[in-house]
């Protein structure tokens, strides 16, 4: 027997959303109950092989199957649960829209798992990729093969942490309000997170927010890292003209490393007010010889090179020559190809704000306005270019 009924769950401090319940005792005669696109939350995790690569490839395969991914969580390295004698997991989650019904979506996700090498094995045991539907629109789904919301959300910090990333601090739609209402805590998903996880648990053995970089995972929750700034310009504020030669720049990099720098940030273009803008080729002419010399230093073992540029062509060539991340003071506003290039490069991207074009008169925006512009630019630009938030800094 099929039935569909409207529920009006309420939680203290949350609006009463309209949610739905759908049950079927067998998927053999399943009749899907939706007629439009639904917003869905999908969790990703794995602990076998190239963990970051498997998550990235799963996201690509989801897009190829028509899922529109609109928001990514951060990336978390977590201790294994239930079966503890196995490698650590990487976990993330995404918000996406789909016109597939819940069981057809499940079928597609299971095929992606199979394509990426998952086979039948020990329950909760090692696997290259695991894809779970956490929420499907405003529906509760119960069948022999699928339960939504996922029944173990509330006991898993490695699921709740990415989920809290996705929903943010505000209820921005009736669907998100419904997701909060599904939580076992009266204060919604944030209440559930405070009970079993919370930001205070970050950095502990069981849960670490990480950044994939230079073939390893950088622990965001560990100690603060120091960036040394190296300007190869004749007209920067503090050190303009001091490090124009590769020899002088290399000696400065060695000095900063000896003083504790973890990252050397190389800039070949001045962004002071009314600075003259270089073309990409001029900037590369200054940058690449110094970058190559610095990367060749024995002191750079375990260190990172960041390139400060707003030219997508410079970013592309710098990464090809070994740079580990791109630091863009314009957040993509000065080169409309930057976001697409960064998405393809799959390196971390530092998105900074500036008050207008440095070649022109200085604008006076408030910090709040600047932050809003950054967030809007990210969601409308980088995230739509398939660049997950776990590769970004602001």
Image: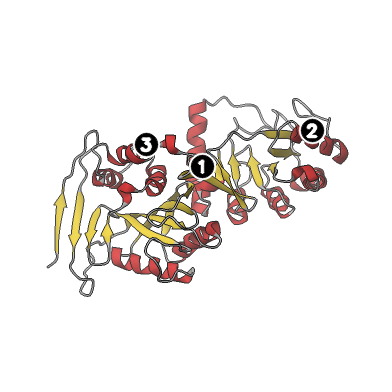
Residue, disc 3: 169
Q: Position of residue 209 (x, y in %)?
A: 50, 43
Q: Along the polypeptide, which appears first: circle 2 or circle 3?
A: 3
Quadrant including the C terminus: top right
Q: Closer to the camera: disc 2 or disc 3?
A: 2
Q: Residues within 10 Å of mark 2 (few under 14, many from 20)?
A: few
Q: Residues within 10 Å of mark 1 (few under 14, many from 20)?
A: some
* Residue 265 to residue 115: above or below: above
Q: Residue at x 59, y 30 (%)?
A: 355
Q: Is residue 181 left or right of residue 259?
A: left
Considering depth in this image, is 292 or 273 the residue closer to the camera?
292
Residue, disc 2: 255
Q: Position of residue 330 (x, y in %)?
A: 61, 38
* Residue 28 to residue 372: above or below: below
Q: Closer to the camera: disc 2 or disc 1?
A: 2
- From this viewpoint, which residue is outermost toward the bottom? 28
Tally the marks.
Answer: 3
């Amino acid at each position: 027997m099929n039935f569909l009924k409207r529920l009006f769950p309420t939680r203290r401090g949350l609006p009463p959303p309209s949610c739905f319940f759908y049950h079927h005792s067998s998927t053999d005669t399943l009749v899907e109950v939706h007629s439009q696109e639904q917003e869905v939350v999908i969790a990703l995790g794995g602990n076998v092989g190239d963990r970051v690569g498997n998550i990235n490839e799963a996201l690509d395969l989801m897009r190829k199957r028509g899922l529109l991914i609109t928001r990514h969580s951060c990336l978390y390295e977590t201790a294994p649960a239930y079966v503890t004698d196995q490698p650590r997991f990487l976990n993330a989650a995404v918000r996406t829209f789909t016109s597939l019904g819940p069981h057809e979506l499940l079928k597609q996700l299971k095929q992606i798992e199979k394509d990426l090498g998952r086979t039948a094995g020990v329950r909760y045991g090692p696997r290259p990729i695991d894809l779970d539907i956490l929420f499907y629109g405003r529906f509760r789904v119960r069948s022999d093969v699928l339960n939504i919301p996922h029944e173990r959300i509330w006991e898993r910090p490695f699921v709740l942490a990415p989920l809290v990333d996705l929903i943010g601090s505000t209820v921005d739609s009736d669907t998100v309000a419904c997701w909060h209402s599904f939580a076992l805590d009266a204060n919604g998903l944030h209440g559930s997170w405070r009970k079993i996880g919370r930001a205070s648990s970050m950095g502990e053995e069981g849960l670490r927010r990480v950044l994939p970089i230079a073939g390893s995972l950088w622990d965001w929750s560990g100690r603060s890292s120091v960036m040394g700034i190296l300007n190869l310009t004749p007209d920067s504020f503090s050190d303009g003209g001091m490090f124009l030669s590769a020899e002088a720049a290399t000696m400065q990099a060695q000095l900063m490393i000896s003083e504790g720098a973890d990252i050397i940030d190389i800039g070949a273009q001045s962004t002071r007010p009314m600075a003259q803008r270089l073309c990409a080729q001029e900037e590369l002419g200054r940058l690449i010889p110094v970058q190559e010399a610095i990367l060749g230093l024995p002191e750079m073992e375990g260190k990172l090179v960041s390139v400060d540029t707003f030219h997508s062509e410079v970013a592309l060539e710098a990464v090809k020559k070994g740079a580990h991340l791109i630091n863009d003071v314009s957040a993509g506003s000065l080169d409309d190809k930057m976001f697409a290039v960064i998405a393809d490069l799959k390196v971390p991207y530092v998105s900074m704000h500036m008050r207008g074009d440095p070649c022109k008169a200085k604008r006076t925006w408030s910090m709040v306005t600047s932050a809003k512009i950054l967030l809007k630019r990210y969601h409308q630009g980088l995230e739509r270019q398939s660049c997950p938030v776990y590769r970004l800094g602001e």
